[in-house]
């Protein structure tokens, strides 16, 4: 459905959109501390599809949930490292969030700081869904069973896109004669009926009045008098406008834009805090304070209204959001989006649910999507369709994707670059072609040899292999390289030191002593 | 449209249980030696021959000369015609069904007030506690609900009487009346006939309907202690259930999705957790009703109130055990509980979109 | 090339020895580690020890059976004269908690009552559990008609409020047993009635667990290897049912003690009661109830407090056990 646009990816590889540095995530259970992630680092660039692959229980999903800071707490916790999203470190408050006392493996005391948590949540609620969206493995569990699909999508739209919605509404209602003149001029310059239709289509979608397209078409066909058409259009819009209180809408949009500014100030304040610029920090802090009190005073009555009768006062916004939700649903190839928007999750099939999930994730035009094994729970044909949608979206809007799977075939089909994870470590990272043609790390090699390959002509005596042993227990992981107990090429150093992920050739990073002597410094 | 079929199907499922219930009461009635049943129909003053005749009449009347299945059919026929037998106690003498219709409204008043009050308290409190597991307020809530859960209802009622009662306790002589004392049903009001008010037979409602505020006030005051104790007795279970529901729901995958969408923490609780957690609590009301109806017996006994509970107790503490009274009250309470569960199920099906009709 | 044997060797798969004892040990360890459930364990144990002591050495602790007559004899042979005396520390330990109706000292009376309350409640819960396990496993394992019948019967039992049913069954049983001249006292009578109405809880619990086990792999394996149905039930299903039932028992014990006391308080035990007898906690409360209007609180308050503390103890122990034994709760 979407034209291939090659070349987008190559040009944008300047600034990574997401940077994960030395991420350490642990789970505190009654049996001991599970060291789920141990210093994982990687970057994702705008517009690329990055794949994470590994056996189950190797920390792929923990990585993705850590990026969103959605680790269930308790028992889990991000213990260290940095995660930059759009060059803002979401873990900058990590130290002040909680004091952690580890007395022994099973006796851990965590004391949370309420204030820091509150600010952290506030910031993250602006980042999650807005800058990064996420879709999950089992769409049936991941959709709220008692909420209509449309409401769930609208919720996301109303959270992040309220300003653009209000802009749209204002633009439609302030439609003036110069806009109409422009439209008529465009229309009259075309003679071909199909192109005329296209102009009408553009016009109605620009001003958000798709419900008038039909009547507009017939109106223009039947009449040649420009001024008559103009007055008719204005009448149509006036009729529609009657139930909309423009004053309220401008007020709401002002309120939210001020809130947006407030959020930006908070980000600035945190940035200043991190770099240690006390003067700037204090200045920002004072600004935030005055702005907050200004908002509280000016929009006092509005806030009360929204608190007690949100549905009523937001209804024009909801109407617009609903229109966008239907658009999103048709974007992800759902048939009959007008019906689906009003149905409950259990009334849809698994594939439809996952599409609805994707539509929900796209609601706020995020620059990146995390797909956590999005096709594992689906049947094969649906899998292919979902993968195609993700791939298309990546090419169409240049949305970066972090794709998590244990299926090497999917990796080969989807991804630009691949990271291989083993027992909470990233052991190899390179481009997709490289990883299939020239895997370096013994684990990757084992992984590649464990699946049948059609593209490689091999001698007949080489058969499918398994990697001996199982994924280690992460409460007491093996010392040094975590793979050494299962490794054919294990050396003495492997059990003593942990290899570092180093670049052995351009775009190819491996953490193994076979290729480099560098080890992690503790 | 579809809900109607669901209700019909649910009613059909009810039939075997209702049949079993009637069978159970029949078995209870036949478990006692039939000689006593017959003796209760024979007048003691008559001479031997007359007594023998009366005995034969009683056997024929009761259908004891028939085989058991036929006897059961007789019993079933009686029940369908509303004939539950007769009871003779100091508390009430007359047909069992009449006793039930006389004393039920008071019990209904008590239980309805209790259910409303407990829901009004439990939902905000339970959601508040459940949203903060392992916090100090959660600890307080848990200790409270455990304490209430472990408390014997009659003991709680006695203590409440002692502390808040009329003549003694911290409130002095201005406290609440120990119910039963000076209950306004004895006052000379035209619509209170034979200790029973008209038209709904619920004193508080009737007084309000007739616009008699003095009696309404008195009836209200008399309701406070019993309703408070009953509410406390079922509050613990409700609180525990709601709290567990909140904690469970908060760990569900779709809550993670909501957070991943960027929904602020407060709205996550309000929009996503609370509704999903509260829906199943509708079903627990059916269970609580069972405990509540048991509690009514105790409360009416302690507070000396004239309701169904007292009628039940009267059947066993009189001079002779009133078998028809026992069987009748068991049957009645069973039917009440069944209807409650039916209503609960239908309401749940109405509220939860996932229920397949 | 790797053979399966070497895979097992490498990953260290071994046959576990004596898992039952290990399980019990780790369970107890977890219970002991949690302070709340440890408190529950201590409270419950103290109660049971007191009750047992009273049974073994009635002359030192409580007064044993027949307290009503022996106490009244002690107090000069008259009932109901004078008001109960307040708790005092001066007249010896018998009077530490004051006296109740007929000047019966509360302390020994409560100790004797504990024996009755705990003993009969345990009897009710255990027999109910045994009946429930047998009925539940067998009906679920054989399925079909018997399963359906069992479900309908439990449905009926669930459709009547528990207390109402207890009242009805006690009455009917009392009357018919007394007519049959069966040697039975009030407590055993109530216990019998409560067992009859209590087993469906366990039958349902067992049934649901059995159904889930029945379809699991290891039963299929056992059937495939030729083990008989009865052997399957006793060797494979019942051991798996036991630990959830055990948790349910520990949770139910508190409720049963409360119901037993409530039923006694309502005076059902005295439908047929022989003197001399020992009052049970609910009855002790109802004995002291008449003095409440004049502000004598201890005859009601103290027995109830004993009841309350026991129920709290059993409940927190049960909660702790559930947290430990239910793998879903363990993290």
Image: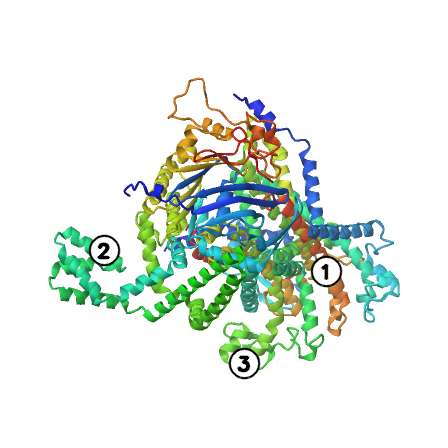
Q: Secondary structure at mark 2?
A: helix
Question: What percent of the width, then of the height, locates residue A66?
Answer: 51, 47
Q: Badge 2 sits on which subunit?
A: A
Q: What is the number of the mark on residue C282?
A: 1
Q: Badge 1 sits on which subunit?
A: C
Within 10 angstroms of label 1, few (less than 14), some, or many (20 or more) residues?
many
Marks 3 and 2 sit apart, C-alpha to C-alpha, by 70 Å
Within 10 angstroms of label 2, few (less than 14), some, or many (20 or more) residues?
some
Marks 3 and 1 sit apart, C-alpha to C-alpha, by 39 Å
Q: Is residue A180 above or below residue C28?
A: below
Q: Is residue B206 above or below residue B270?
A: below
Q: How many marks?
A: 3
Q: Quadrant of residue B25?
A: bottom right
Question: Is residue B79 in sight in this rendering?
Answer: no
Question: What percent of the width, then of the height, locates residue A224?
Answer: 11, 61
Q: Which residue is mark 3?
A: B213
Q: Which residue is mark 2?
A: A202
Q: Is residue A229 left or right of residue B230?
A: left
Marks 2 and 1 sit apart, C-alpha to C-alpha, by 83 Å
């Amino acid at each position: 459905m979407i034209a291939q646009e090659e070349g987008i990816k190559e040009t944008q590889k300047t600034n990574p959109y997401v940077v994960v540095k030395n991420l350490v995530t642990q789970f505190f259970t009654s049996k001991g501390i599970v060291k789920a992630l141990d210093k994982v680092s990687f970057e994702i660039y705008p517009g690329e599809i990055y794949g994470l692959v590994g056996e189950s229980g190797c920390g792929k999903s923990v990585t993705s949930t850590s990026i969103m800071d959605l680790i269930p707490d308790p028992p889990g916790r991000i213990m260290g490292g940095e995660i930059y999203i759009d060059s803002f470190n979401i873990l900058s408050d990590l130290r002040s969030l909680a004091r952690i006392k580890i007395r022994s493996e099973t006796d851990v005391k965590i004391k949370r700081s309420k204030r820091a948590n509150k600010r952290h949540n506030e910031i993250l609620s602006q980042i999650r869904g807005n800058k990064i969206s996420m879709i999950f493995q089992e769409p049936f569990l991941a959709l709220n069973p008692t909420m209509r699909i449309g409401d769930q999508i609208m919720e996301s739209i109303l959270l992040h896109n309220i300003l653009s919605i209000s802009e749209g509404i204002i633009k439609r209602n302030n439609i003036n004669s110069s806009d109409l003149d422009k439209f008529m001029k465009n229309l009259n310059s075309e003679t071909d009926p199909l192109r005329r239709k296209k102009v009408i289509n553009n016009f109605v979608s620009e001003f958000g009045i798709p419900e008038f397209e039909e009547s507009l078409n017939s109106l223009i066909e039947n009449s040649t008098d420009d001024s008559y058409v103009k007055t008719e259009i204005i009448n149509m819009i006036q009729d529609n406008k009657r139930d909309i209180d423009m004053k309220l809408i401008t007020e709401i949009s002002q309120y939210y834009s001020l809130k947006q500014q407030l959020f930006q100030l908070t980000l600035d304040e945190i940035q200043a805090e991190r770099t240690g610029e006390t003067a700037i920090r204090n200045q920002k802090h004072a600004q935030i304070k005055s702005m907050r009190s200004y908002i509280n005073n000016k929009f006092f009555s509005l806030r009360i209204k929204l608190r007690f009768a949100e549905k009523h006062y937001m209804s024009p916004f909801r109407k617009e959001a609903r229109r966008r939700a239907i658009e999103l649903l048709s974007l992800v190839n759902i048939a009959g989006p007008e019906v689906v928007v009003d149905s409950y999750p259990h009334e849809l099939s698994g594939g439809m649910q996952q599409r609805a999930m994707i539509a929900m994730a796209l609601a706020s035009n995020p620059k990146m999507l995390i797909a956590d094994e999005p096709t594992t729970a689906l049947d094969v044909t649906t899998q292919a369709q979902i993968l195609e949608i993700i791939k298309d979206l990546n090419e169409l809007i240049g949305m970066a994707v972090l794709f998590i799977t244990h299926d090497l075939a999917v990796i080969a089909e989807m991804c630009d670059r691949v990271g291989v994870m083993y027992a909470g470590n990233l052991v190899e990272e390179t481009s997709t072609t490289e990883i299939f043609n020239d895997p370096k790390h013994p684990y990757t090699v084992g992984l590649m040899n464990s699946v049948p390959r059609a593209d490689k002509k091999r001698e007949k005596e080489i058969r499918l292999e398994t990697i001996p042993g199982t994924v280690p227990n992460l409460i007491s992981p093996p010392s040094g390289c975590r793979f050494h107990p299962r490794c054919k090429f294990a050396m003495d150093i492997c059990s003593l030191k942990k290899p570092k992920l180093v670049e052995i050739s351009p775009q190819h990073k491996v953490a193994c002593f076979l290729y480099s002597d560098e080890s992690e410094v503790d | 449209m579809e809900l109607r079929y669901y209700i019909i199907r649910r009613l059909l499922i009810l039939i075997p249980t209702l049949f079993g219930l009637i069978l159970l009461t029949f078995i209870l009635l036949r478990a006692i030696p039939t000689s006593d049943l017959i003796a209760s129909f024979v007048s003691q003053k008559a001479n031997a021959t007359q007594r023998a005749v009366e005995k034969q009449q009683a056997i024929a009347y009761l259908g004891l000369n028939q085989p058991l299945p036929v006897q059961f059919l007789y019993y079933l026929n009686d029940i369908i015609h509303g004939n539950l037998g007769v009871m003779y106690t100091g508390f009430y003498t007359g047909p069992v069904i009449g006793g039930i219709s006389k004393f039920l409204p008071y019990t209904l008043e008590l239980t309805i007030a209790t259910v409303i009050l407990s829901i009004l308290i439990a939902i905000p409190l339970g959601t508040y506690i459940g949203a903060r597991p392992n916090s100090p307020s959660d600890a307080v809530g848990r200790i409270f609900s455990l304490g209430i859960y472990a408390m014997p209802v009659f003991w709680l009622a006695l203590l409440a009487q002692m502390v808040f009662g009329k003549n003694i306790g911290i409130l002095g002589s201005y406290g609440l009346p120990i119910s039963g004392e000076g209950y306004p049903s004895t006052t000379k009001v035209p619509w209170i006939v034979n200790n029973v008010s008209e038209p709904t037979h619920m004193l508080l409602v009737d007084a309000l309907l007739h616009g008699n505020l003095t009696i309404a006030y008195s009836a209200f005051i008399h309701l406070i202690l019993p309703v408070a104790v009953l509410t406390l007795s079922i509050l613990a279970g409700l609180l525990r259930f709601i709290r567990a529901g909140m904690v469970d729901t908060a760990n569900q995958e779709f809550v993670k999705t909501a957070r991943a969408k960027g929904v602020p923490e407060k709205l996550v609780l309000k929009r996503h957790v609370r509704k999903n957690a509260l829906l199943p609590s509708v079903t627990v009301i059916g269970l609580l009703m069972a405990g509540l109806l048991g509690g009514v017996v105790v409360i009416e006994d302690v507070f000396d109130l004239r309701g169904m509970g007292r009628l039940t107790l009267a059947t066993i503490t009189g001079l002779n055990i009133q078998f028809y009274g026992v069987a009748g009250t068991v049957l009645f309470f069973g039917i009440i509980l069944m209807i409650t569960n039916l209503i609960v199920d239908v309401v749940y099906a109405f509220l939860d979109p996932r229920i397949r009709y | 090339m790797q053979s399966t044997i070497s895979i097992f060797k490498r990953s260290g798969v071994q046959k576990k020895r004596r898992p039952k004892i290990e399980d019990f040990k780790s369970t107890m360890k977890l219970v002991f580690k949690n302070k709340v459930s440890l408190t529950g364990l201590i409270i419950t144990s103290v109660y049971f020890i007191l009750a047992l002591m009273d049974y073994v050495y009635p002359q030192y602790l409580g007064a044993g059976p027949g307290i009503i007559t022996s106490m009244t004899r002690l107090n000069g042979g008259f009932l109901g004269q004078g008001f109960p005396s307040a708790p005092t520390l001066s007249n010896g330990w018998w009077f530490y908690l004051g006296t109740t109706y007929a000047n019966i000292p509360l302390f020994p009376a409560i100790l004797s009552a504990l024996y009755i309350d705990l003993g009969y409640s345990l009897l009710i819960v255990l027999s109910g559990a045994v009946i429930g396990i047998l009925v539940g496993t067998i009906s679920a394992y054989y399925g079909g008609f018997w399963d359906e019948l069992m479900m309908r019967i439990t449905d009926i039992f669930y459709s009547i409020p528990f207390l109402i049913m207890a009242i009805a069954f006690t009455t009917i049983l009392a009357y018919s047993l007394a007519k049959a001249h069966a040697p039975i006292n009030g407590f055993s009578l109530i216990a019998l009635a409560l067992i009859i109405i209590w087993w469906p809880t366990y039958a349902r619990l067992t049934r649901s667990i059995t159904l889930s086990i029945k379809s699991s792999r290891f039963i299929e394996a056992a059937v495939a290897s030729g083990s008989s149905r009865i052997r399957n039930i006793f060797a494979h299903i019942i051991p798996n049912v036991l630990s959830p039932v055990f948790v349910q028992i520990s949770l139910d014990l508190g409720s049963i003690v409360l119901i037993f006391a409530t039923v006694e308080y309502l005076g059902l035990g005295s439908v047929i009661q022989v003197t001399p007898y020992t009052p049970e906690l609910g009855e002790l409360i109802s004995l002291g109830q008449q003095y409440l209007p004049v502000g004598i609180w201890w005859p009601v308050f103290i027995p109830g407090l004993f009841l309350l503390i026991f129920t709290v103890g059993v409940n927190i122990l049960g909660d702790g056990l559930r947290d430990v034994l239910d793998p879903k709760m363990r993290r």
